[in-house]
Image (cartoon, rainbow, N blue to C red):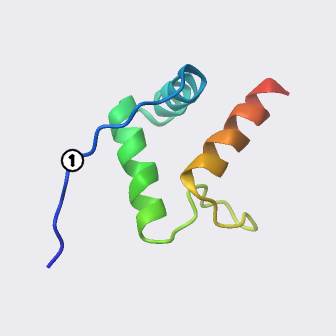
Amino acid sequence: MMKQVSVTVGLDVDIYETLELMARGESRTVGEELEYIAGRVAVGEPVDPRPNYKKLGFVEFIRNRVEAMDE
């Protein structure tokens, strides 16, 4: 049986702002975006489902998004 739990996490300001921008682009709240990412990571799915992208953990995914926004 699968058990659903709630988790509270602290995020760096940069990561939070990145999530906020991602959520805005997807019409989700920041919380919904975080749940979406965590859900994909939990089942071993790529966070970024585009073809030819390797599966990334949450931290690597956020780091890549922040680096892409800086370019």
Q: Residue at x 42, y 65 (%)?
A: 42
Q: Check disc 1 and report its element: helix, strand or loop.
A: loop
Query: In the image, 34: left or right of 4?
Result: right
How many numbered circles does the render carry?
1
Q: Residue at x 29, y 38 (%)?
A: 8
Query: In the image, 31: left or right of 58?
Result: left
| Residue 20 x, y percent position in the rendering | 49, 25
Task: Work out whether residue 35 or residue 57 is closer to the camera in this orientation and state it.
Answer: 57
Which image quadrant: the N terminus?
bottom left
Compared with 3, 16 (above or below) is above
Q: Residue furthest right?
A: 71
Q: Residue at x 35, y 30 (%)?
A: 29
Give the image quarter of residue 12.
top right
Query: In the image, 34: left or right of 49?
Result: left
Q: Label 1: few (<14), some or many (≥20) within 10 Å?
A: few
Q: Is residue 31 visible?
A: yes
Q: Residue furthest bottom?
A: 1
| Residue 70 x, y percent position in the rendering | 79, 25
Which image quadrant: the C terminus?
top right
| Residue 18 x, y percent position in the rendering | 58, 28
| Residue 40 x, y percent position in the rendering | 45, 61
Q: Is residue 28 visible?
A: no
Q: Residue at x 74, y 28 (%)?
A: 69
Compared with 7, 29 (above or below) is above
Residue receiving disc 1: 6
The amino acid type, in three-letter code, at marker 1 is Ser
